[in-house]
Amino acid sequence: MTTVELGMPDAPTPIDAAIARSLEQHGPKVTELKGKDFKTDQEVRWCPGCGDYVILNAVQSFLPSLGIAREDMVIVSGIGCSSRFPYYMNTYGMHSIHGRAPAIATGLAASRPDLSVWVVTGDGDALSIGGNHLIHALRRNVDMTILLFNNRIYGLTKGQYSPTSEVGKVTKSTPMGSLDHPFNPVSLAIGADATFVGRAMDSDRKGLTEVLRQAAEHKGTSLVEIYQNCNIFNDGAFELLKDPATGPMWTVPLVHGEPLVFGPGGASCVVRDDFGGLRIAETNQVDASEIVVHDATREDPSYAFALSRLSTQDLRYTPMGVFRKVQKPSYEAMMSEQLDEARLQGPGDLDALLAGGDTWEVKA
Amino acid sequence: MTGTNPTVAPSESNGALATTVSSSAPGGLVKSVVELDRVVIRLAGDSGDGMQLTGNRFTSETASFGNDLKTLPNFPAEIRAPTGTLPGVSSFQLQFADHDVMTPGDAPDVLVAMNPAALKANLSELPGGGLLILDSDEFTPRNLAKVGYATNPIEDGSLEGWQTVSVPLTSMTTDALKDSGLGKKEAERSKNMFTLGLLSWMYHRPTEGTVRFLERQFRRKPEIAAANIAAFRAGYNYGDTTEAFAVSYEIKPAPMRPGRYRNISGNQALALGLVAAGQRSGLPVFLGAYPITPASDILHELSRHKAFGVRTFQAEDEIAGIGAALGASFGGALGITTTSGPGVALKAETIGLAVMTELPLVIVDVQRGGPSTGLPTKTEQSDLLQAMFGRNGEAPIPVIAPRSPGDCFDAAVEAARMALTYRTPVMLLSDGYLANGAEPWAIPDADSLPDLTSAVAFATEPNGEDGEFLPYLRDPETLARAWAIPGTAGMQHRIGGLEKADKTGNISYDPANHDFMTRTRQAKIDGIAASIPLTDVDDPDGDARVAVIGWGSTYGPIGAAARRIRSSGRKVAQIHLRHINPFPADLGEVLARYDRVICPEMNLGQLSLLLRAKYLVDIESHTQVRGLPFRAAELAAVIQDAIDTVNPAAVNPAVNGALQ
């Protein structure tokens, strides 16, 4: 039998070998791409007018700016309208099962730190059936980017209320109005100590692209909540923020290093309240020094959490942008370090492992 | 059976047996040595008394001495039930012999009871005349009252039917450690080592291994190591000098195939098998697991082997454990998840996803008593049908089961082979008895293990006629689909849980395609039969008319029962299945040869159901769900009954037909 030195740190694994073969065949990785390079031949099957189209287009046009080869990108999704996303992206992808995408992506990202791993999920997928996986992914800080499409409704099952629907929502399953209090996904993520949390609007191409870019560049788990209109079952859910007449009044744009002033003519602002939180104030009623200057990099999550609590269920005073962006070691990097550290004692010797400590010899 | 029970009363054994050798002990005491061919010892105590550790050490000493052995740890699910109560009793049974043994023994010859609760819980299983060693210090009015003894059994004559040796194990331990600097409570904790020392003397066990073990175990607390070693030696010396034990026993090493051996438990062997599968396939091993009894030790063991590139991920729940493993498989790793029955229930949906995405995945189910939380620390084989069918839709997966602790190693390698070759999730069904039980194991040469590199052939070039990559284009022989991993240029593709179109893998709701794909997935699993050995039938003369068929950990008890049957002059064929899905190709034909086929299982007849359904054979199911392995004697009685009904004349008259 030929002796193959398998699994040694210096010996290429079949994974390395496959990638090396692919490089031989295709030449160096192609990282200068155009938006259309990320499109597939699959017919997009969302309802006409769905906010998902806008997000898909925004993602496809911004991805080339990251300089990541298509084959190095993997998109994992769960179940729901948003979770069809991978089929339309010319990358590797897995359309998995309801709620479990963060778990599947964790295993992939932890074992293949060379890949750019993305999760596409929705409010039902991520916050209802998959709530547990989401919070644990966030606390672990595996390097991946989670796009949470929040339309505040169950679309694929045809219109039941979701864990982000406002109280009193009348739907097929709640004819007299829903009773349960909704999650604020940003608050939830910050509560789980997520290292990157942002929020953007589907129709705001510029704002969405900016948050996505920062999320993709962040090392660790990034969560981006994307408000997405479901024009069939929850049309106009975000109209208050989208309407040019009301939007500026109720949107708090988050710009790192800038004072939190918003509304027509900068009439409103964010100041500290008496209990360690934040509150909205009239700009002309407070001293300029009282206005909070946005700092997404604060280690203590209390500030970002307080920001997330400014908005009400009906979306008044909704901060948009990057709430929190802090550096912490990422899980897969630490995992690889432990492997390297273990190998410092020498690579694994299978014969020695099988023999263990106490052995005895039976002579012929 | 040829074994004889040890006997302790000096009047019976001193010079009475041909195998007795007299020797001089210090103080002029004459001690004799009796040679035995096998012994079954059960150590029982409170769950805080360290009975499992004592049992494991005695096992290691016995293994390194060269006896063959099998063990049966039996402990409560509670970490520390209230001290001295019946629910808190933990025991460890071990059979060792000068020949190969197949079970830990039906009943003990020697029972060591560290307190009244241990006595009460175990005495009924010690046959009359058996040796009973008691820690008299623990038989206090308070401890007796806790378990409902009105009087002290040591004094009230109720133990007259056994050879009872009552020894103040606790106070002798504290006496031995009075200069150790340890407090009384702490010193008392070493009484298990005192007991181990005494047993080591009684059975002539080598002691160096235990001394080395204690030094290693307590290397950060040298005073504790020293105290335990002192207690161990004091117990040994006590045996050597006391008049309470006038006899010691010698069990010669068992003849074994030449080679290097170690002692190994099922969970250890399984973990090493998984590391070996990674090394032999070249793939990095990724374990996603959530702690669960009795599977957690596999996670513990694998987490120590990072130098082999093994990644272990303790997930937030069972579903995340398998999800992460499947994600790793998608990336080209050998994805593994380990659990027990309740965990398999939670993983069912992800197993279905792995069936649909046709990715390799090894699922280890260390079965325990069910349903629901059931009996977490006890053994059972009741997850077979869950393994076979516990998913929505037609979702066939291969199922295999190891037959002994050491065999868990080979089963793990085989599970990985099937998963990688056929791109499928594979279920490996171990159980609590295999997981915690131990036996001597012939250490294999790494180079002699199956080479799994050919099972891994990542696709790097388009396989379609138009230069496209078709992820569901199959190998004509294995029906395995093409496996391309992220990072490979030009091979980008999407997979998922929705039905796939043949070849392209695109979403398809086409009726004919779904029918075709469903049948193809089934055909792929059925086709694995071509790569596995034909049915292994153990029938020395080849003319038995009754067969016993089993799977998994019942191998030992069924094998021991078959020996009894054969030594009574009867004939029986033993068929033991490793592969349960698919079955060996010739199994139906083999079963049809016998007049009667008996199938003992630790469930209510799950394999019987499968065999009857598939082969229309009238399998006779014999079942038991006591949380413990079968007793060989009981199985032998069932088999004997079947044989004698089929053909009373088949009994060899020379051996008088009675079971021994």
Image (tube, coloured by chain):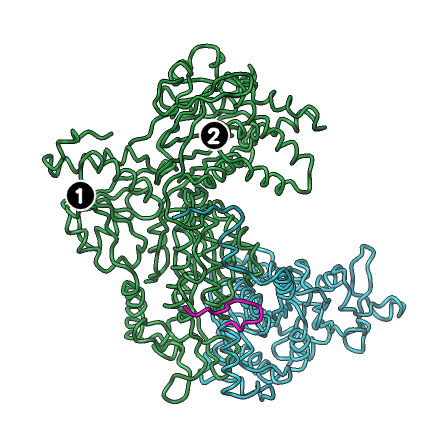
Chain colours: A cyan, B green
Instruction: Quarter of the image for the N terminus of chain B: give it.
Output: top left
Q: How many marks?
A: 2
Residue B232's x, y, as percent?
A: 58, 30
Q: What residue appears at the point 44 percent right and 58 percent down from the top-left corner?
A: B445
* Residue B287 disc label: none
Residue to which mark 1 is pinned:
B546
Nearer to me, A294 or B653: B653
At label 2, the amino acid type is Leu
Residue A118 is inside the magenta segment: no
- Magenta part of the protein: which range? A1-13
- Figure check: A253 above or below B212: below
Amino acid at circle 1: Val
Q: Secondary structure at mark 2?
A: strand
Camera-nearest residue between B246 and A146: B246
**Residue beneath disc 2:** B43
* Residue B124, x across and y down, in percent: 38, 23
Q: Main secondary structure of the magenta part?
A: loop
The quarter in which the C terminus of chain B is drawn is top left
Residue at mark 1 to residue at mark 2: CA–CA distance: 37 Å
Q: Residues within 10 Å of mark 2 (few under 14, many from 20)?
A: many
Q: Chain of mark 2?
A: B
In the rendered image, is residue A122 in sight? no
Image-based side of B372 in relation to A275, left or right: left
The secondary structure type at the circle numbered 1 is strand
**Which of the two discs, 1 and 2, labels the residue nearer the N terminus?**
2
Instruction: Point out residue B458 in the picture as x, y percentages from the top left corner.
Output: 44, 75
Residue placed at 42% from the left, 43% from the top?
A: B439
Is the C-beta separation of discs 1 and 2 under 8 Å?
no
